Image (cartoon, rainbow, N blue to C red):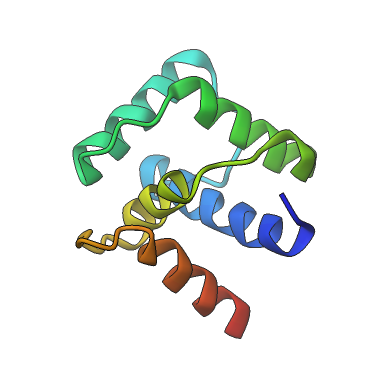
């Protein structure tokens, strides 16, 4: 993942973690990763792997963009969870909308 994209991804994942657990992003144990995957699925209808979520959190905390390469649908799902927006036919647009807002800040 490119550095510019990674900073937006880091911000997104921090929002997801805070929304899910009410605390700043931190390493997530196995059970918490399962809970996060379940919360995201309940809110969005999309199941993300708890292992992938753990890897994303670790990459963000290690500030290592080379460790992650999430798909556009995964990014859109995380953006949907963070913002609470409903997905439409163009679900990937949620990621690009989130990204655009972050780039303007």
Determine the residue positioned at 62% across, 28% down.
55
Q: Nearer the viewer, residue 83 or 46?
A: 46
Q: Nearer the viewer, residue 29 or 50?
A: 50
| Relative height, residue 70 to residue 3 (above, below) | above
Determine the residue positioned at 29% across, 28% down.
38
Task: Point out residue 36 in the picture as x, y percentages from the top left corner.
Answer: 38, 31
Q: Is residue 46 left or right of residue 22?
A: left
Task: Point out residue 66 in the picture as x, y percentages from the top left corner.
Answer: 78, 39
Determine the residue positioned at 49% across, 14% down.
30
Label count reads: 0
Task: Point out residue 2 in the picture as x, y percentages from the top left corner.
Answer: 75, 56
Q: Nearer the viewer, residue 13 or 2?
A: 2
**Residue 102: quarter of image:** bottom right
Most extreme residue toward the bottom is 104
The answer, for residue 82, to whether it is visible in the render is: yes
Determine the residue positioned at 69% across, 42% down.
60
**Residue 82: quarter of image:** bottom left
């Amino acid at each position: 993942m490119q550095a510019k994209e990674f900073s937006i991804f880091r911000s997104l994942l921090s929002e997801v973690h805070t929304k899910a657990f009410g605390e700043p992003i931190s390493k997530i144990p196995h059970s918490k990763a399962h809970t996060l995957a379940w919360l995201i699925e309940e809110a969005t209808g999309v199941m993300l792997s708890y292992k992938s979520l753990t890897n994303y959190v670790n990459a963000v905390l290690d500030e290592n963009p080379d460790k992650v390469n999430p798909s556009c649908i995964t990014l859109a799902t995380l953006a949907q969870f963070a913002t609470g927006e409903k997905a439409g036919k163009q679900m990937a647009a949620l990621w690009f909308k989130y990204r655009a807002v972050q780039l303007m800040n």
